[in-house]
Image (spheres, grey):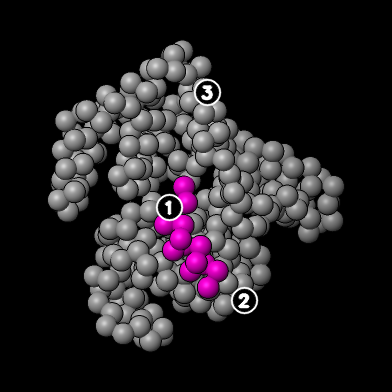
Amino acid sequence: PKADIPFTKAAAHVSRLFQTAGNDQLLLRQGRAKEARARFEEAAAEQVNYYALRAADMIGSGERSEVAAFDEAAEREEAEAWLAAWLDLPDASLRSSAQAIEKDPRFQRGRELLSLGLRDEATAEIEALRKDVADDPLALYQLALSLRDLGLYRPSIACAVRLIHLSPAGSVREAPRFLQRLAYPLYFADLVVAEARAHGLDPLLLFALVRQESLFDGWATSRADARGLTQIIPSTGEWIARRLSWRGYRAHHLYRPYLNARFGAWYLARQLEDFGGDLFAALAAYNGGPGNAARWLARARGDDDLFVEVISLPETQLYVKKVYEHYALYHALYGR
């Protein structure tokens, strides 16, 4: 999916600072700590992309925690008041628009096809509807909710992200909390939290990985045949099954969320263990392979930021940055 956090001029500036010979880390190495700190703080103030988030970590403002409770009803009421004010609508319009979306023939066909187990056909109907309302904020909001209720999480998230980008907020971090949570949800929480804790992971890290891998679509399949919530390739799944003494493994079992969440959590934990707790190397290994990650790590010589920049596979480099961004957003929303 496309990036959910816009790259602003400030973010581009920070990116250049990290990627040129005059970067802020070089200032630190030259003993110019005061100047380096000022530039890190400038980047962190934006909090818009990977580079700004790295700057925040470097000045000690990055946080790591577990899932905190929240009042969804109150946040939804606040978000709907915000939407009504932005769109200059009475509250009744929000309720009537929900009925209109669910009366749309494409939505009704999609719901019926889904109930019959015809998921691909249902998705085609829903995607046609979603594209048709792509510039209608109110319809996007109601469609996001209706799709969430159907368990069609990928298009629900897409609707929420599109709505936020159309809105005065402009970015996920500036939107009402309820909308942020629609874009960065905790679906499959019973599985994700349990498996994360069982394998010594921060649950919010595993949520960030699942969001990047599949957008919480348990039936997701990549061009490389990676499958399910955490996008496990069948051969890797077979290897994991042997390590876990999981009997009767078959490739199609990767579409079972409970199995996929366990395998993905175990595999991520294994990479973290193998790379001494280095999150960047573990994520690179998860996506690009442990052998590649080891070579990049050797080139970086212990420098996390240099490690990310020397990743030679563009897909893996973007993957590491995006999971890091998602992880930070999950902490901002749910951490305590």
Distance in Å between CA atoms under marks 3 and 1: 25 Å
Query: Could you tell me which residue is drawn at 39 percent across and 42 percent down?
Result: 157
Task: Kindly identify which residue carries mark 2.
Answer: 276
Query: Could you tell me which residue is drawn at 28 percent across and 65 percent down?
Result: 255
Task: Kindly identify which residue carries mark 3.
Answer: 82
Tag 1 secondary structure: loop
Asked if disc 1 and disc 2 are in contact, CB closer than 8 Å, the reply is: no
- Which stretch did the figure color magenta? 185-198
Q: Residues within 10 Å of mark 1 (few under 14, many from 20)?
A: some
Tag 2 secondary structure: loop
Q: Residues within 10 Å of mark 2 (few under 14, many from 20)?
A: few
Q: Amino acid at mark 3?
A: Trp
Ranked by sequence position, the earlier of labels 1 and 2 is 1
| Residue 230 location, quadrant | bottom left
Ranked by sequence position, the earlier of labels 2 and 3 is 3
Q: Is residue 123 above or below residue 276?
A: above
Q: Is residue 193 above or below residue 272?
A: above
Q: Is residue 193 magenta?
A: yes
Q: Is residue 23 visible?
A: no
Measuring from the top left, give residue 152's x and y in whole percent: 31, 46
Distance in Å between CA atoms under marks 2 and 3: 45 Å
Q: Amino acid at mark 2?
A: Gly
Measuring from the top left, give residue 6's x and y in whole percent: 50, 37
Q: Is residue 283 above or below residue 95?
A: below
Query: Could you tell me which residue is drawn at 46 percent across and 31 percent down?
Result: 164
Task: Kindly identify which residue carries mark 1.
Answer: 187
Q: Nearer the viewer, residue 115 or 197?
A: 115
Q: Is residue 18 magenta?
A: no
- Camera-near label (1 vs 2) is 1
Q: Nearer the viewer, residue 20 or 152?
A: 152
